Image: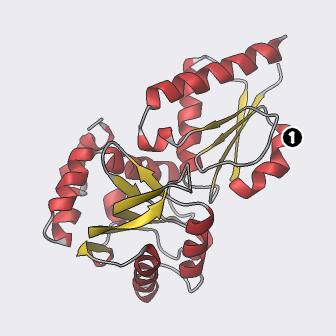
């Protein structure tokens, strides 16, 4: 099946997005989803990359308008409401997975 | 692992700065003088912070993790500044919101090390309220170094606080 493409963005494209990517990999592993691809980028690159992805996750504030589902994942850095955030991201990934399977 | 990047000359305690610009310029100058960053680092750090702030609100304290491009970093580091009075910074996930930050961790990563491990350990430190409070009470940079040493943190670094 088609891979779920998850874009993870932060200011520099290397720091907090790296943490976010690590958490998302863990979530996918727990969901037993192996058909996914994580793409990291800077916040300014989001607009040029969003067309090719299924989900956008950001640690910095994202003000762009997009049809693609977007979730702010700063909670993975601070730990504040992290459990609820994990559930939210998990549900979103599961939803996309089920859509792509059809 | 992270302790190898926490150099004594980069750890400051009981510091006072009127604002973040002053803090950033002073830290950047120190890093440049000691050979950790290039000339472009200071401007890059400040302009990145304006566009994409690095302030974080934790349980009941505030930290910041300013950093810029890898290309400005000559030698990897974590420069820790514990402030006696907070400086106003902006929240990473909501830049309109100002927060009073007392614990600043300037992160310098180049491509020489394992980014994931480096960052995970930094995040564990900032999420560890007990450790942060101990750092606040530290009378000297040597104390901070010892709090962040592998011996002191051991396996506990990756345990929840």
- For mark 1, does the 10 Å Cα neighbourhood hold few (<14), some (14 to 19), or many (20 or more) residues? few
**Residue at the bottom extreme?**
B33
Q: Quadrant of the N terminus of chain B?
A: bottom left
Q: In the shown orientation, is residue B75 left or right of residue B3?
A: right
Residue under label 1, please give it.
A51
**Residue drawn 36% across the image and 57% down it:** B2
Q: Would you place residue A91 above or below residue B3 in this image?
A: above
Instruction: Give the x, y percent position of residue A36.
Output: 72, 29
**Residue drawn 55% across the image and 74% down it:** B46
Instruction: Give the x, y percent position of residue B113.
Output: 50, 59
**Residue drawn 62% across the image and 58% down it:** A11
Q: In the shown orientation, is residue B72 left or right of residue B150?
A: right
Q: Would you place residue A47 above or below residue A68 in this image?
A: below
Q: How many marks overall?
A: 1
Instruction: Give the x, y percent position of residue B9.
Output: 29, 79
Secondary structure of residue under mark 1: helix
Instruction: Give the x, y percent position of residue B35.
Output: 45, 84
Q: Quadrant of the C terminus of chain B?
A: top left
**Residue drawn 48% across the image and 65% down it:** B66
Q: In the shown orientation, is residue B5 left or right of residue B145?
A: right
Residue B151 visible, this angle: no
The answer to which image quadrant residue A78 occupies is top left
The answer to which image quadrant residue B100 occupies is bottom left
Residue B49 visible, this angle: yes
**Residue at the top extreme?**
A102
């Amino acid at each position: 099946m088609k891979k779920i493409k998850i874009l993870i963005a932060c200011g520099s494209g290397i720091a907090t997005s790296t943490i976010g990517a690590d958490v998302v990999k863990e979530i996918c592993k727990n969901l037993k989803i192996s058909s996914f691809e994580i793409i990291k980028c800077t916040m300014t690159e989001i607009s040029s990359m969003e067309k090719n992805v299924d989900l956008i996750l950001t640690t910095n504030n994202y003000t762009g308008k997009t049809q693609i589902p977007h979730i702010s994942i700063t909670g993975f850095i601070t730990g504040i409401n992290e459990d609820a955030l994990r559930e939210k991201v998990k549900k979103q990934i599961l939803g996309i997975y089920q859509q792509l399977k059809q | 692992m992270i302790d190898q990047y926490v150099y004594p000359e980069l750890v400051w305690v009981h510091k006072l700065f009127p604002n973040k610009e002053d803090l950033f310029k002073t830290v950047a100058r120190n890093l440049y003088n000691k050979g950790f960053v290039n000339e472009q680092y200071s401007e890059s750090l400040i302009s990145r912070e304006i566009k994409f702030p690095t302030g974080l609100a934790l349980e009941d304290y505030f930290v910041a993790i300013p950093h810029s491009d890898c290309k400005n970093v000559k030698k990897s580091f974590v420069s820790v500044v514990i402030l006696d009075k907070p400086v106003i910074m902006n929240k990473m996930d909501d830049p309109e919101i100002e927060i009073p930050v007392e614990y600043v961790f300037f992160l310098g990563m180049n491509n020489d090390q394992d980014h994931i491990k480096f960052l995970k350990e930094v995040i564990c430190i900032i999420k560890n309220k007990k450790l942060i409070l101990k750092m606040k009470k530290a009378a000297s940079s040597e104390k901070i170094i010892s709090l962040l040493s592998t011996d002191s943190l051991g396996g506990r670094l990756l345990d929840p606080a």
